[in-house]
Amino acid sequence: MTKKDTERLVQQAMQQTIPDKEALWAKIESDLPAQPAFSGIRKTSRSKMRVVYSVMGAAACFLLIVGGLGIWQAARGSKTAMSENKMITADTPKNCDEPAAAPEDKQEQAGAAEEYGEAAAENEAPVMEGIYEDNAVSNDLEDVVGKQSLSPEINAAQSAAAEEPGGSTILSGTIYGDSVGVEADAALRTEAQEVLDAGTAYLLKEPPMTEEARANGVLLGFDLNGQEILLAAYDGRYQLIADGKAYAVSETGKALLDELTAGH
Amino acid sequence: MTEAEFEQAVEQIRQGNKNGLRVIYEAYGDKIYRLFLGKVRKREDAEDLTSDFFLKLWETAPLHQSGKGHRAWMGTIARNMAIDYLRHAGHETPVEDADLTNQESLTERTTAEDTVISDMNAADILSQLSEDEQEIVRMHLAAELTFREIASILKRPLGTVAWKYRNAIGKLKRLAEEGKLV
């Protein structure tokens, strides 16, 4: 039995569906309030502030106009000789009819969000620290790749290409779920790095594995002097995992291997 | 459902159109149900939680920031709801607190009142795994979340999630070959 078969077996056992989907929807629909709390408002805090600033802008325009008229009338009524060119008039601000642009105010936004309860904050997808800060994987790609199944020909091609001319297999490919794992035997550190480089390079250049790897990461497993090591490669970075612990994330794998194998 | 389709549905919700929620329900209702079922183990409770989830989604979907990965976002909401439910119901320690080496069988935790349902087969299969492994396998195979989404929901590094999943499948494969899987 392959790992793929195992996955299929387990997935089949977990394909439960809502027993009566229509009935449950009817229940949900009957419990729905007429309007969502945030209906018609895309970004509540900004909308509120935009209204506030619009009112302020309109009020400012009004005052300027009134003030300008007052000054103009005063100037007309003045007995001081003035030339037309020097008549004081109030300049009407540009775009007075348009609402003033709402300046960015993150504090106000945060306050407005809090005003709508903790649910707003707790329902936000968590922002990951460290290696996830610039996670910019295209969601469209994930949606496309997520259900892609790799053809047997690709599996065969992967295994075949990994065999050395002498016939011994240094890489054997296993595709499980939507990530790719490559098992490699390497007794020496130098060989491990070469195998790692070769395996990663191979997997990342062959479509559609390239898309799979980019979307979900490449997992390389190998034995190093009896210790199982996994290297997860994604977004151009590597995470070394051994004994259930993640050691570090770096731009290349080599430095991590040196650190890990220092005692061997 | 693509991000664009989700945003369209959210826009409908903003306008008070229930069809927007219905579209999301049709796309993800079963997956959300499976997530809850894996946590609470009772079909009735999983249905109640699913209903509560979509009622909550009706209120909070307009707050979702576009382009932020709606599946991981909803998965996080669902997981948090399940954990809250287990805590308030006085159930055992939620999955997130389980020790990595915890090999306690899930069947030992079920109460006498639990309804015997067909999906106990899935529970039996997964009972061979640690709590962490079970959760990841359920999220990936039942809820069809990618490793990246799972990592985001569980707040774990992507490599760790993939590694645990790999180990889990490896264990299940060995058990299947030994004829020990249901």
Image (tube, coloured by chain):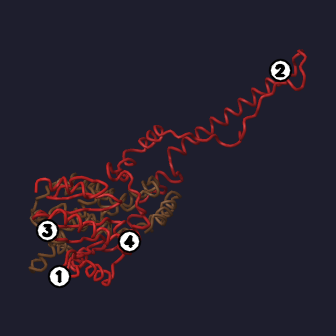
Chain colours: A red, B brown
Callout 1: residue from which chain? A
Q: Are marks 4 and 3 in contact (CB under 8 Å)?
A: no
4 or 1: tag closer to the N-terminus: 1
Secondary element under disc 4, as helix, strand or loop, is helix
Residue for badge 1:
A1
Mark 3 → mark 2, Cα distance in angstroms: 90 Å
Q: Mark 2 points at which residue?
A: A74
Between A209 and B127, the one lying in front of the other is A209
Q: In this view, does B80 lie to the left or right of A46?
A: left
Measure the alpha-carbon separation of dots 4 and 2: 74 Å
Q: Residue at x 34, y 51 (%)?
A: A126
Q: Is mark 2 on a helix, strand or loop?
A: helix
Q: Mark 4 lies on which chain?
A: A
Nearer to us: label 1 or label 2: 1
Q: Distance between the residues labelled 1 and 2?
A: 97 Å
Residue at mark 4 shares a chain with residue at mark 2: yes
Q: Mark 3 points at which residue?
A: B127
What residue is shown with label 4?
A: A145
Nearest the eye: A165 or B72 = A165
Give neighbour class at mark 1: few <14, some 14-19, many 20+ (Cα, 10 Å). few
Pinpoint residue A206: horizontal percent, then vertical percent.
36, 75
Element type where label 3 sits in the image? loop
Residue drawn 35% across and 59% down? Answer: A236
Q: Are marks 3 and 2 in contact (CB under 8 Å)?
A: no
| Distance between mark 4 and mark 1 Cα atoms | 25 Å
